[in-house]
Image (tube, rainbow, N blue to C red):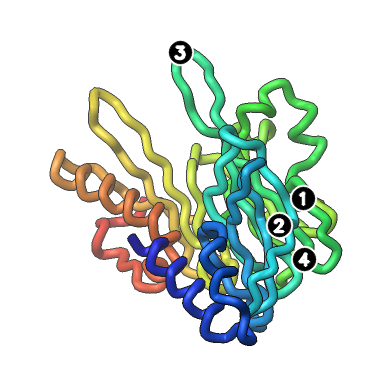
Amino acid sequence: MLKGIVTILLLATFIVNAKAPAWEHYAKLPMVEQPSLSPNGELIATLYNTDSGPTISVTKFPDIDFKVLARLKKNKDRVDFIRWSGNRYIIVSASYPEYVNGQFFRVSRLYSINVETSETKVLTSPRFTDDRWYKYQSFELVSSLKDETDYALISTYDKNDKGYVVYRVHLGTSDFDKVQGNKNDIGSWYADSKGVIRLGLAVEEKDDVFTASIWYRANKDAELKKFTHRCGAKMTLFLFKLYQKMARKRMCSLIGSLDVKLFGSIT
């Protein structure tokens, strides 16, 4: 519903601001999704659907002449989100289906698009692509760094840590620099608004019961500390619901108000 409202408002804005175009032009407008305005307000990035498949496109605000920057494979790739990093780069998260061990799952990949040069780069590294399991390896955006817009924090599997770690990645060169290791089987990482890794979550299931371990640091210089969760079914359900909430809201607002007393003592 929200996407539909945003799309309608976007098209309405085009109509109001365009310089006296013929009305019939608007009757032929393609459907766009996930419109995102650049920080300087000059460009709109959208998921723009065409007959040959979905594209990532931009247009100058408030024009309606879309410039295609990247094209996805029709009926296979799915754009999960697009996000500006400064006014130069668009970060795209796309996923595709894979089948293994009798079930389908989606593999997430990240791309950067330079809107000035139209260059698209897969955010990966030979350290990953040379591994035999690379086709099943997902890459997740932890944070787009508002103070370092040529970089982003990305999480993916590292064979040395045998878990998901966090890298500081250059959006133009795709150079990976590890900034957060993982010796605690943490599956998801979250950063605050300044790009500091503040929270890690490890969730495991046994006998249909979900158990969450929460690792937290107060600031960038502090060590990660684990919150205990020796509790009954009621508390376990609370932790699982908290995990779902964190995944949806990316933790930015929750990190600042995290209260140690809520979870008990620290081990």
Residue at x 47%, y 77% (from the top left corner): 12
Mark 2 surroundings: few (<14), some (14-19) or many (≥20) residues within 10 A: many
Residue 77 in picture, x, y percent from top left: 60, 38
> Are the residues tagged 4 and 2 within 8 Å (C-beta)?
no
Residue 105 in picture, x, y percent from top left: 48, 28
Q: CA distance from mark 2 to mark 1?
A: 6 Å
> Are the residues tagged 2 and 3 within 8 Å (C-beta)?
no
Q: Amino acid at mark 1?
A: Phe
Residue at x 66%, y 41% (from the top left corner): 52
Mark with earlier residue (4, 3):
3
Secondary structure of the residue carrying tag 3 is loop
> Are the residues tagged 2 and 1 within 8 Å (C-beta)?
yes
Q: Is residue 236 left or right of residue 19?
A: left
Q: Amino acid at mark 2?
A: Arg
Q: Amino acid at mark 4?
A: Val
Mark with earlier residue (1, 4):
4
Q: Amino acid at mark 3?
A: Gly
Q: In this view of the protein, which residue sits in the foreground, 175 or 204?
A: 175
- Residue placed under numbered mark 4 in the picture: 115
